[in-house]
Image (cartoon, helix red, strand yellow):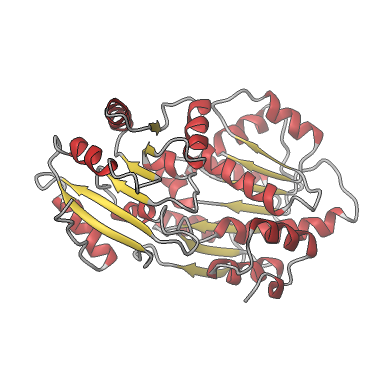
Amino acid sequence: MTFNELNIIEPILKALTVEGYTTPTPIQEQAIPIILNNSDILGCAQTGTGKTAAFSIPILQKLYRNVKQGRDKEIKALVLTPTRELAIQIGESFEAYGKYTSLRHTVIFGGVGQRPQTDAIRNGVDILIATPGRLLDLINQGYINLKKIDFFVLDEADRMLDMGFIHDIKRILPLLPANKQTLFFSATMPQEIASLANSILKNPKKVAVTPVSSTVDTIDQYLLYAGKKEKTALLIDLLKDKSKKSVLVFSRTKHGADKIAKSLCNAGIGTAAIHGNKSQNARQSALLNFKSHKTRVLIATDIAARGIDIDHLSHVINYDLPEVPETYVHRIGRTGRAGNSGIAMSFCDPMEEISRLKDIQKLIGRKIPVLADR
């Protein structure tokens, strides 16, 4: 199937062609017709399956037809997402797919001055991409009114729960009109998220793509046993291989991320770190340099990494095994995207991390092969 067969309008098809997209991913193929047909949707899909395009393309299409009949300054679509990085990434998608539609969007998040954001809202936007805290702040200040929302997207709902945003979401929901189309996406469906979905969706169509327990076939996975004190030397040794062109390294803690980055830089390996304690400008600069391959290695914590979307990421390295096994699937899913191959390497401390390894292997249904010759 092609995007043309999904009845996508010409301005968006033209933008998709410019971006090099011709064939929709499974979630796009399933979700776009449902959304165009005015139904609410409950989507279970992990990062890297193409869900941003799955909701942004049909929203742009439906808004484009409305805008041609006349426009005002009211916000028509709200996309709520947990992190600044992910909000920016979604904004870039709306920019790319909507470049020939004349639709206006803006992205708002905390940690930066609000003036440019409020100026954009005052000038009028059709689509607002927001993190919960800044959205509530600007609503309380009187800058934002959600009464004319036609589309509400709740993205990465499980991560919202992990980050403690569930109460903010419950404060935002009553501010939305009853007559709206709601698009709900989550990589996993714990009970609290399922209950939230049931409370806001009306007769939703359900779409599930790539269950969270599965790891993409194009990703080669390897395990390396290393004690806590051996891991940094092992990482440096691995990164001496220049064929590892773009490497995302996961650290369990912010302090750990900074410590790893400092050790790699001291070893002459171009490295940056991103986590919640970094300033917004520092995080964006690190991401930009990594995406443009000015920096070969990026050290990240799980939450900060949610907004990283790079098609040609060659390697993911788990410096620390995650405490939640589903997180392993999310992490390694950063590579092997868009049909490309990828390599995931995981360090395991045989004294402290064996139980985590067992949980991961139980979830994915296979043993990760040990890389003996490192």
Up-down: is 236 above or below 102? above
Residue 258 image-quadrant placement? top left
User: Which part of the image, by quadrant, shows the N terminus?
Assistant: bottom right
Residue 300 image-quadrant placement? top left
User: For the point 30% across and 34% down, which residue is it?
Assistant: 253
Task: Specify whether residue 173 is in view.
Answer: no
Q: Nearer the viewer, residue 307 or 14?
A: 14
Q: Nearer the viewer, residue 125 or 299?
A: 299
Up-down: is 174 above or below 53? above
Q: Is residue 288 left or right of residue 54?
A: left
Single out the residue that lies furthest toward the front: 242
Q: Is residue 223 left or right of residue 99?
A: left
Label count reads 0
Q: Is residue 117 left or right of residue 31?
A: right
Up-down: is 352 above or below 38? above
Q: Is residue 45 left or right of residue 137?
A: left
Whole-percent x, y for residue 339 in the image: 47, 64
Single out the residue that lies furthest toward the left: 351
Whole-percent x, y for residue 189 in the image: 42, 59
Up-down: is 95 above or below 271? below
Q: Nearer the viewer, residue 349 or 265?
A: 265
User: For the point 29% across and 39% down, which residue is it?
Assistant: 252
Whole-percent x, y for residue 177 in the image: 71, 51
Residue 368 image-quadrant placement? bottom left
Task: Specify whether residue 369 is in view.
Answer: yes
User: For the point 65% across and 73% down, which residue is it?
Assistant: 2
Single out the residue that lies furthest toward the right: 70
Q: Nearer the viewer, residue 337 or 132?
A: 337
Whole-percent x, y for residue 81 in the image: 55, 45
